[in-house]
């Protein structure tokens, strides 16, 4: 077996080398209980010294990048990646907000520009490429909507079949996307957590390849590339603070892992301060960071993509946040909607509530004078506002039609 990566269990830290499909550490998986975050989530590790030695000098990062970061991904050939343009999303600098100049630099990285309009495409593409390499033609995933529409879209591009299990209250737009991409869409009576468990049962019974976030170790591998792009977009500088919306804890762990790998490759010495932003109505990751025993509250928030009762990747996220002094902040639904309106009106970017939550976290800390002057801040926009229109219905009233008449129009415009 000549495999360029191995796995390390986040819970017991045992290393596992296998070219078989594996989801969780077998020893730790046995201790998993319903209603608790997953034990035994696997982290993919590479031979960083070898990668670093092979390509030495200043060009290290550009060489890795030119090869689609293949050295740092669990796939062998880049031709198993579907032809859709994924990642390389734009980053913009914003200098005023809420009508006032900001006291610190703010960059917005817009991952809503991925093919299915969310950051989840970064994960789906690696899962899909790995499946292609293994000759697997069907992939199942549980989803609040974005991961499912992403897997459906990527599978469509790759000629694979997707089975997507969603909670019955997933937004209409995301369900429509899944159906339009030709996936098998299965709404279940229950929550995302129920959909997650059901999809794992299906995989255990049938062997169908499972993309579930955290459960499949490769979702983090795809998402970490966002960190490489941030490094690249800022020409090797590391932001002081990065704001990430948090539900399951996978995107935030992926951003940590991306920067950690840059450190292991000696490309940077420091880890940015990563701020985990959760909705007040779904605080199950940040509220448990200092608890001995995990306790969950029933989630209720407008931000459906980060509405999670049991954050599956809690343990990895907590480890990263403790090791690298991460921060956490909670935002209300009202703050999320206000941030979404501000973002749209300041930048022309329309973010879904879950994505706007990250900006709400930045704006809240800025208002509280908790952002250092002149610091460099980055907010990750993880999904498009077009994905969840109902969420903003109560906050936005559209104008009534006027008669088709110039005088009436002038009066309406007060001209
Ligand atoms: Zn283990």
Image: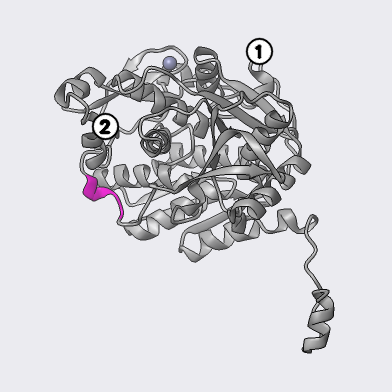
Task: Say if 46 sits above or below 305 in the image.
Answer: above
Q: Quadrant of the N terminus?
A: top left
Label 1 vs 2, first from the N-terminus? 2
- Front position among marks 1 and 2: 2
Total marks in image = 2
Residue in view at x 31 percent, y 54 percent: 82
Instruction: Please tell me whether residue 292 belongs to the stretch shown in magenta.
Output: no
Question: Can you see residue 308?
Answer: no
Instruction: Please tell me whether residue 80 belongs to the stretch shown in magenta.
Output: yes
Residue in view at x 67 percent, y 13 percent: 293
**From mark 1 to mark 2, how far is it between C-alphas?**
37 Å
Q: Left or right of 110: which side holds 87?
A: left
| In-front residue for pair 345/218 | 345
Using the rendered view, name the quadrant where residue 281 is placed: top right
Residue of label 2: 61
Task: Say if 391 sits above or below 220 in the image.
Answer: below
Q: Position of residue 150 (x, y in %)?
A: 47, 52
Q: Where is residue 122 in the image (x, y as percent from the top left)?
A: 41, 44
- Within the displayed image, which quadrant is ligand 1 positioned in? top left
Residue in view at x 35 percent, y 42 percent: 126
Are dots 1 and 2 in contact, CB under 8 Å?
no
Stretch of the chain drawn in magenta = 78-82
How many residues crowd mark 1 within 10 Å: few (<14), some (14–19), many (20+)? few
Task: Say if 183 sits above or below 333 in the image.
Answer: below
| In-front residue for pair 288/191 | 288
Q: Left or right of 217: which side holds 272?
A: right
Residue of label 1: 290
Mark number for residue 271? none
């Amino acid at each position: 077996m000549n495999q360029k990566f191995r796995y390390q269990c986040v819970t017991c830290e045992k290393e596992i080398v296998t070219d078989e499909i594996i989801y969780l550490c077998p020893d730790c998986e046995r201790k998993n209980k319903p209603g608790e975050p997953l034990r035994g989530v696997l982290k993919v590790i590479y031979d960083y010294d070898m990668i670093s030695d092979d390509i030495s000098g200043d060009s290290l990062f550009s060489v890795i990048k030119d090869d689609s970061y293949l050295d740092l991904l669990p796939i062998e050939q880049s031709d198993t990646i579907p032809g859709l343009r994924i990642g390389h999303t734009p980053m913009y600098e914003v200098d005023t907000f809420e009508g006032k100049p900001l006291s610190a630099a703010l960059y917005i990285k817009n991952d809503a520009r991925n093919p299915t309009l969310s950051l989840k495409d970064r994960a789906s593409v690696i899962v899909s490429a790995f499946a292609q390499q293994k000759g697997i033609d069907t992939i199942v995933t549980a989803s609040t909507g974005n991961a499912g529409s992403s897997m459906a879209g990527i599978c469509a591009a790759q000629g694979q079949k997707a089975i997507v299990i969603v909670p019955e209250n997933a937004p209409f737009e995301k369900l429509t996307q899944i159906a339009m991409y030709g996936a098998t869409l299965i709404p279940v009576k229950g929550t995302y957590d129920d959909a997650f468990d059901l999809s794992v049962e299906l995989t255990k019974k049938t062997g169908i390849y499972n993309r579930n976030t955290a459960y499949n170790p490769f979702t983090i591998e795809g998402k970490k590339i966002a960190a490489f792009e941030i490094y690249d977009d800022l020409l090797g500088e590391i932001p002081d603070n990065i704001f990430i919306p948090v539900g399951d804890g996978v995107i935030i762990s992926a951003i940590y892992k991306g920067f950690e790998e840059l450190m292991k490759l000696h490309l940077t010495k420091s880890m940015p301060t990563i701020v985990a932003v959760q909705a007040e109505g779904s605080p199950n990751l940040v509220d448990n960071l200092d608890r001995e025993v995990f306790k969950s509250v029933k989630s209720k928030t407008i931000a459906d993509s980060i509405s999670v009762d049991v954050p599956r990747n809690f343990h990895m996220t907590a480890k990263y946040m403790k090791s690298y002094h991460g921060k956490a902040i909670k935002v209300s639904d009202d703050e999320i909607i206000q941030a979404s309106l501000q973002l749209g009106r300041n930048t022309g970017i329309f973010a879904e509530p879950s994505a706007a939550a990250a900006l709400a976290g930045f704006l809240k800390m800025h208002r509280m004078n908790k952002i250092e002057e002149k610091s460099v801040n980055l907010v990750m926009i993880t999904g498009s506002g077009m994905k969840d229109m109902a969420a903003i219905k109560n906050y936005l009233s559209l104008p009534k039609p006027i008669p088709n008449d110039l005088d009436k129009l002038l009066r309406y415009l007060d001209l």
